[in-house]
Amino acid sequence: MFPWLRASLAGLSLLTFGGTTLAERKDLGNGFLHHGVATPVSHPRGIVATVDGQGRNVVLVWLFDHRGGYALLMIDAETGQSEEFPTPFPPGGDCPYASILSSRNRYYTHFNSHFVEFDPVQRKFTFFAKTAPQMAMSMTEDDRGVIWSATYPQSGIVSYNPHTGELRDYGHVHRENWAQYPRSIATDDRGWVYFGMGSTLGQIFSLNPATGEVKPIGPPEERGHGYGVVFRGVDGKVYGIPTAGRGDNWYQLYEGKAMKIGKEPSVKPKPIIAGDQGLFHRTFPDGKRVRVCDLVEKVLVVEDPKTGQAKTLHFRYSSEGAHIMGLAAAPDGTICGGTAFPMRFFSYHPKTDTWVNRACYGQWNTVARQGDRFFVGGYTGGFLLEWNPAQQWVPTEKGKEGCNPQFLAEGYPDINRPHELLAHPDGRTLILAGTPGYGLTGGGLLLWDRQTRQSVLLKHTDLIPQHATMSLVALPQGKILGGTTTAPGTGGEKKAKEAELYILDLATKKVEWHEVVFPGVQEYTDLCLAPQGLVYGFADRRRFFVFDPKRRQVVHTEETGEKFGPTNSQQGPRVFVVSPKGNVYILFVKGIARVDPNSFAITLLAPSPVPIGPGGDILEGRIYFASGSHVYSWRAPEE
């Protein structure tokens, strides 16, 4: 680790969230500056209250920052003293999506293709093993104490017997041409296993633990968009429905056999301390409860229901910060954006070298300035926010006026995960684009008019069916050029074979032209208006091209992957940075380049000391970008 990075991380605990803090920029040489970590805290991916080997109440927390699930935190619920246990395998950017506290007081999770056990009594990780990819979406414990997990992306099943230390990897037991989310798993009192998955098409399956044989439950016509659901009843049987919410077609499942029972059963679920990434088991064995476990403020509040008293404790942990989704220059002369897990707003002021960090609404995938306002396109729900930096910050509430940022509109389910937010040069139109809801295919466009305060939502069937828009640029005469992606919504089925460019008339909301410009291309990563009415673009992060929208032809193309490597990336990548002087810069992972407007030649101006990630904007001659959780800038000599 670089010395300047160690120093910056060591001081993170001094930050006060919601206020202004000193950044202490560092000069990295060759025009690059390091400005610090935008959101220097981690996010919990499963919290459970239990006891350690001395019978003391402790809280176990899976920690997640931009590196992935890097450690487990143990907090003493009487003193606040904390201890951190690094994950015994590389997190690889992955993290827990499910966890379980077993009846034997062991805490389990399964991610980055590793199953892992932590024992709070021994205060250490006591088992881990590599499995078929990738991470558990649900976990359970059978009546023999065996732990089971069901994994994304192709319904992998793993069992671990804590009595014998034996792990059995059943591999991927069901295949689809889309990524599966097995969000529930249960076992009956005879040891048979059942899991429900989705979301393109829900289904439930039975698994014979002895043979590994897997069978679907219910006929194909009972499958629909959504998730199959199963749960273990206190009567020893499992109950499930192939797609939740699609009629009264519940099944009773026992010894691998299915009996249709119609309506949802009234039987109570068997208590098991398990859940998804939001698991929060609050009750200690002695009846005390965790009221608050806040990783941002580093505060633990434990209450005693018997006395009504509560104790507030402060704890510590290390973090390299949340990963940055994107950034842009705001009207108040700051660099602003959002981080994910936790979802936070950040603002960096170059003149004072200070940070502001606040809780924000959702995940700020895409950000853009238009005039005196700063706009946000976010996940989930494909929402659009408007922020006025000149006014007091008022936390966003959907449907409530007077907030700042103000919630304007949303595009769900046609847009769930935004990839582009075009602040149109007309000064009044915002266009949000992205992929649709979970398990769906084909993304739309959300158009917002600042004057009328009205929105229009175009579906993928109004544009190019089964495609989603990845990139946009404004053209003269009320037209826009869009570049699509073949990617579906998360967990959806890819149906388009090749990405396309298209021209849309904003007045008629009709597509005037579309074409597979480059055979085999899967996404148009970013687009940028260039001199002489041309458009620069990147396809699949490795092919640069120049497009003439008048002739609707490519006039130049270059394979840049071998020479420069891929462009930067994020859900809203912002590859191109256009300066006030009209220079067009490109953010590659390896460095910053510029395009010659006459020859279209690309010149690498400065290799970056860190891999360049989310882009990207220019402010007072400096190009700002992110890498992981950190913000950097580079002085452009000609600006």
Image (spheres, grey):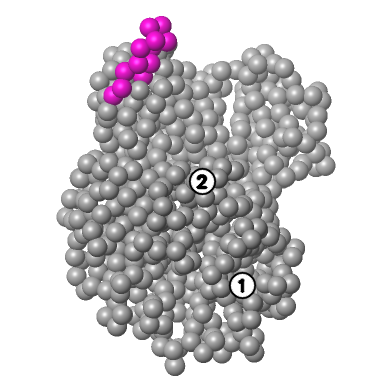
Name the quadrant containing residue 251.
top right
Q: Is residue 306 magenta?
A: yes
**Predominant SS along the magenta part:** strand
Secondary structure at numbered mark 2? loop
Secondary structure at numbered mark 1? strand
Residue drawn at point x = 51 percent, y = 20 percent: 145
Name the quadrant containing residue 239.
top right
| Rendering coords of residue 362 (x, y %) | 50, 46
Q: Tally the numbered discs.
A: 2
| Rendering coords of residue 321 (x, y %) | 33, 47
| Rendering coords of residue 7 (x, y %) | 18, 50
Residue drawn at point x = 63 percent, y = 48 percent: 438
Q: Sequence order check: which comes first, mark 1 or mark 2? A: 2
Residue 402, label in figure: 2
User: Residue furthest toward the bottom?
Assistant: 598
The amino acid at mark 1 is Gly
Residue 340, label in figure: none
Residue 187 in view here: yes
Q: Which residue is mark 1?
A: 482
- Magenta residues? 302-313
Tell me if residue 517 comes above or below residue 114 in the rendering. Answer: below
Residue drawn at point x = 49 percent, y = 59 percent: 375
